[in-house]
Amino acid sequence: MFTLVRSRVRTAALALSAVAALAFGGTAATGAAAAPVPAKQGPTSVAYVEVNNNSMRNVGKYTLANGGGNVFDVAVVFAANINYDTATKAAYLHFNENVQRVLDNAATEIRPLQRKGIKVVLSVLGNHQGAGFANFPSQQAASAFAKQLSDAVAKYGLDGIDFDDEYAEYGNNGTGRPNDSSFVHLVTALRANMPDKIISLYNIGPAASRLSYGGVDVSSMFDYAWNPYYGTWQVPRVTLPKSRLSPAAVEIGRTSRSTVAGLARRTVSEGYGVYLTYNLDGNDRSADVSAFTRELYGSDAVYTP
């Protein structure tokens, strides 16, 4: 992808529970087991990181003041791309120079998080070229892209894949319009390739509304789904237990702390198991993070540079 600096004016969401985080996908290719994580009672907290501008290491700098361990359970590398090769007429997985830098430097950008017990997931996003998750021309084409995704997870020792069906611009470069079968074939193949890894859904775009085809519903194949609109409450329309859903989505430093706290209170009171945050940067955001950790875990957040 060309360098995509994403300033999302809209709003988002992602998730997991601390116990469930350990259940879905081990810390791959680390060469060492993750350190024991102090027990944390409450929803799974997720942090998307814009790696064009920020380091994944920032996710591991926040802990709970009451000794409950990491604030964040899942860190999302934002973002790889689904690109389109006009010569072969096929979609392919692409990393811009910043995403590639993170992956090539997994020893310093990813492994330290995994050793703390934080799962690291790769987000995949459209890139204005017409290729998306919802317009593969055949089941074979969807399966081929699924293999590229699972191969990347294995190669770089990641914990899963996050689907974000935005900016595809379906129809560009002579590509097809969204169809009902593509995303079902893609998710089915990816789950078969990596049965023990995380697959999450950023609940937006044509793919998110096409989860069933030919008697197959892939909803249950996702580990998490979240609201894509920051600063709002919206329950994802995906058939998953409440423990795997994040109706709350906030942008750190832009969503007001009162809204952040209110959405966290509602997450707890209505029994949801995930709390999504976006755009964690390298500044000390402990005040913004504490706005939700007090409600989710009964503790302030501590930032350690």
Image (cartoon, helix red, strand yellow):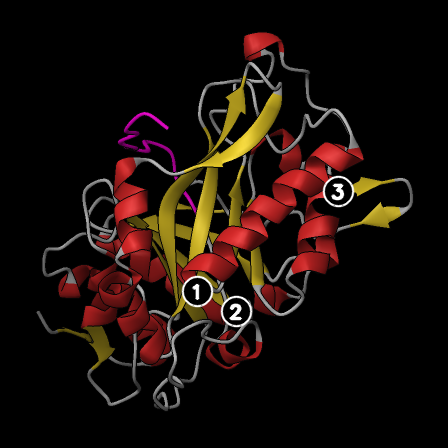
Q: Residue at x 36, y 87 (%)?
A: 37
**Residue 11, magenta (yes or no):** yes
Task: Tell us which disc is closer to us: 2 or 3.
Answer: 3
Looking at the image, residue 192 lies above or below residue 146: below
Residue 237 x/y as whole percent: 66, 47
- Under mark 1, the amino acid is Gly
As helix, strand or loop, the secondary structure at mark 1 comes to loop
Q: Quadrant location of residue 112?
A: bottom left
Task: Report the magenta residues as a range.
Answer: 1-13
Looking at the rendered image, the disc whose residue lies closer to the viewer, 1 or 3, is 1
Residue 21 left/right relative to 133: left
At 23% across and 40% down in the image, what residue appears? 52
Seen at 24% across and 70% down, the residue is: 60
Q: Which kind of residue does numbered mark 2 sit on?
A: Gly
Disc 2 versus disc 1: nearer the observer: 1
Measure how far apart labels 1 and 3 are at the Cα level. Answer: 25 Å
Instruction: Identify the residue position indicated by label 2 in the image.
Output: 273
Q: Which residue is mark 3?
A: 184
For marks 2 and 1, the one nearer the N-term is 1
The answer to whether one can see residue 230 in this image is: no
The residue labelled by disc 1 is: 157
Local crowd size for mark 1, using a 10 Å CA cut-off: few (<14), some (14–19), many (≥20): many
Instruction: Compare marks 1 and 3 and give the one earlier in the sequence.
Output: 1
- Residue furthest out toward the right: 215
Secondary structure mostly seen in magenta is loop
